[in-house]
Amino acid sequence: MEHKQNKDPIGSVMVVGGGIVGMQSALDLANSGYYVYLVEKSSAVGGLMSQLDKTFPTNDCAM
């Protein structure tokens, strides 16, 4: 007897936190076929990265 697995994603996912990791996770899940809810407690996304004025390793301006 052959068991056929469903390879298509079913359902939706909630990602809590709109920082860099949350946004990347939401994008990866959406590209995999899931419907994604991205939840952030503040009015802007970006997490701690949005508070930095320089980024490592190039020391470029983050704003």
Image: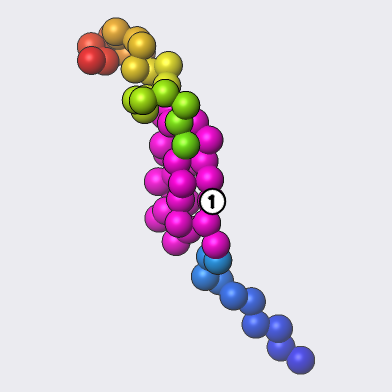
Residue 21 visible? The answer is no
Inspect this view and state whether residue 20 appears.
Answer: yes
Whether residue 36 is situated above or below residue 53 in the rendered picture: below
Q: Relative to 20, say whether 55 is above or below.
A: above
Quadrant of the image for the C terminus? Answer: top left
Helix, strand or loop at mark 1: strand
Which residue type carries mark 1? Val
Disc 1 crowd, CA 10 A, few/some/many (<14, 14-19, 20+): some
* Residue found 45% across the figure and 56% down from its top: 35
The image shows residue 10, relative to residue 41, as above or below, that is: below
Q: Mark 1 points at which residue?
A: 13
Which residues make up the magenta segment?
11-38
Question: Where is residue 18, by image quadrant?
Answer: top left
- Could you tell me which residue is drawn at 71 percent across and 83 percent down? 3
Residue 26 position by quadrant: top left
Against 40, residue 59 (above or below) is above
- Is residue 35 on the magenta stretch? yes
In this view, which residue lies farthest toward the bottom?
1
In this image, 61 relative to 30: left or right? left
In the drawing, does residue 35 fall left or right of residue 56? Answer: right
The location of residue 45, given as percent across then percent down, is 36, 27
- Left or right: 14 as drawn, with respect to 45: right
Residue at 29% over, 8% down: 53
Does 24 lie within the magenta span? Answer: yes
Q: Residue at x 34, y 10 (%)?
A: 52
Q: Position of residue 17 (x, y in %)?
A: 49, 31
